[in-house]
Image (spheres, helix red, strand yellow):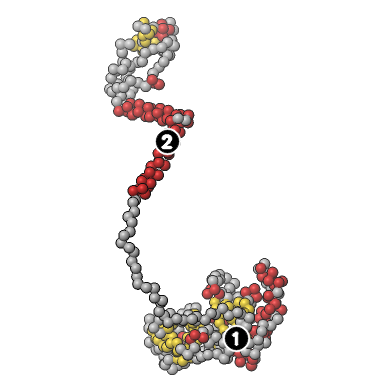
Amino acid sequence: MSPATTGTFLLTVYTLFSKVHADRNVYPSAGVLFVHVLEREYFKGEFPPYPKPGEVSNDPITFNTNLMGYPDRPGWLRYIQRTPYSDGVLYGSPTAENVGKPTIIEITAYNRRTFETARHNLIINIMSAEEFPLPYQAEFFIKNMNVEEMLASEVLGDFLGAVKNVWQPERLNAINITSALDRGGRVPLPINDMKEGVYVMVGADVAFSSCLREVENPQNQLRCSQEMEPVITCDKKFRTQFHIDWCKISLVDKTKQVSTYHEVVRGEGILPDGGEYKPPSESLKSRDYYTDFLVTLAVPSAVALVLFLILAYIMCCRREGVIQLVHHSSIQKSTKELRDMSKNREIAWPLSTLPVFHPVTGEIIPPLHTDNYDSTNMPLMQTQQNLPHQTQIPQQQTTGDFRLTTFQRFEVNGIPEERKLTEAMSL
């Protein structure tokens, strides 16, 4: 690593737990990236059973961090640990509001095998920076890195060295690092070694170089709008290790920003005297709700009456309505007749089942059963027997035997019908 890169890297605060069982004090600067690594090796010796000399212990260990007296960390401080077998990392950028105020972070380590715990305190003493904030700030989006990979001292130092070669500032600080997931990004698919992506903000004391401003020209802006890669001449200085999305780069010049701060004039905290409280007068006029009551009932009733009249006109006065009423009436009559037939079998036979003409002579005949005929005891299939209105005649078969054939006698207008019998005898 070059001396320039080494000097730049020293501006980023990295701390590790020492082996001394005491509170740890760190002194980060406001506006400069702060990184604190929680090493699992430090806590392994505190969980029983203690490993023997030369014996390796690889228990899963997780960490919980919070501000003393509060359930969570300060707003500027983040924490990440991918797996119980990796180190935890506290990182963030302290703000100027916390300068001079010691921030005590409680760190609790959990051994997931033995369920033992160990607790230590980290005291963060935020110092004021010489030039805070730096007037020129640039935020890069690196697509092929996760946040814990970018927080490694060697990787961050290489990135700052590449930025310094492009920008050529005298002072260059890493201001903040944010995971793309914290900006609304999606979790990448576990294929092709895809990464979440990370935003890295750096600040310098000189204006942006021409290479960084190339992304602002119209041609590159058009390519970005079409989701195409812009043409950046200095991209090759990053490409070997960092894949930068130049369409998402952000350049902020704080020297040209107009301050919108308005001084607040604070008063003495006493409201102006508005006099004594005056309650409403007791002589309030009573309100009559009778009219409102009538309107509430009359309007729905009138609407219902109009709808009823319209329906009555459609059903009774128009042809379509009359046809529907007649059809409904016929259905009701047929239904009633069928129900009466099922309840009482002594009723008259339906007209649709009575013969109209004699099957032989074609003359009109009366019904077979009178209205007073007892049909309750009628069998489903009548046996062949000699009835008073039946005639039996013998018929010779081909073998010489005779058989009887029964013919029913009909009377038309009181005269017995013998035509069928005569035709049978003549055969």
Nearer to me, 353 or 208: 208
Report the amino acid beneath label 2.
Answer: Leu
Location of residue 102 (image quadrant): bottom left
Above-or-below relation of 70 to 20: above
Q: Position of residue 219 (x, y in %)?
A: 71, 71
Residue 60 seen from this side: no
Question: Mark number for residue 234?
Answer: none
- The quarter of the image holding the C terminus is top left
Between the residue at mark 1 and the residue at mark 2, the CA separation in whole angstroms equals 83 Å
Q: Are marks 1 and 2 in contact (CB under 8 Å)?
A: no
Residue at the image position 38 percent from the left and 81 percent from the top: 115
- Tell me if 260 is positioned left or right of 220 in this view: left
Q: Position of residue 251 (x, y in %)?
A: 63, 79
| Residue with the mark numbered 2 | 309
Crowd rating for badge 2 (residues with CA inside 10 Å; few <14, some 14–19, many 20+): few
Crowd rating for badge 1 (residues with CA inside 10 Å; few <14, some 14–19, many 20+): many
Residue 52 seen from this side: yes
Above-or-below relation of 8 to 307: below
- Tell me if 65 is positioned left or right of 281 in this view: right
The local secondary structure at tag 2 comes to helix
Residue at the image position 62 percent from the left and 89 percent from the top: 171
Number of dots carrying numbers: 2
Above-or-below relation of 201 to 370: below
The residue sitting at the bottom extreme is 20
Q: Position of residue 347 (x, y in %)?
A: 31, 22
Above-or-below relation of 54 to 402: below
Question: Mark number for residue 134?
Answer: 1
Q: Position of residue 101 (x, y in %)?
A: 46, 89
Report the amino acid beneath label 1.
Answer: Leu
Nearer to me, 399 or 291: 291
Among the two numbered marks 1 and 2 on one chain, the one whose residue lies closer to the N terminus: 1
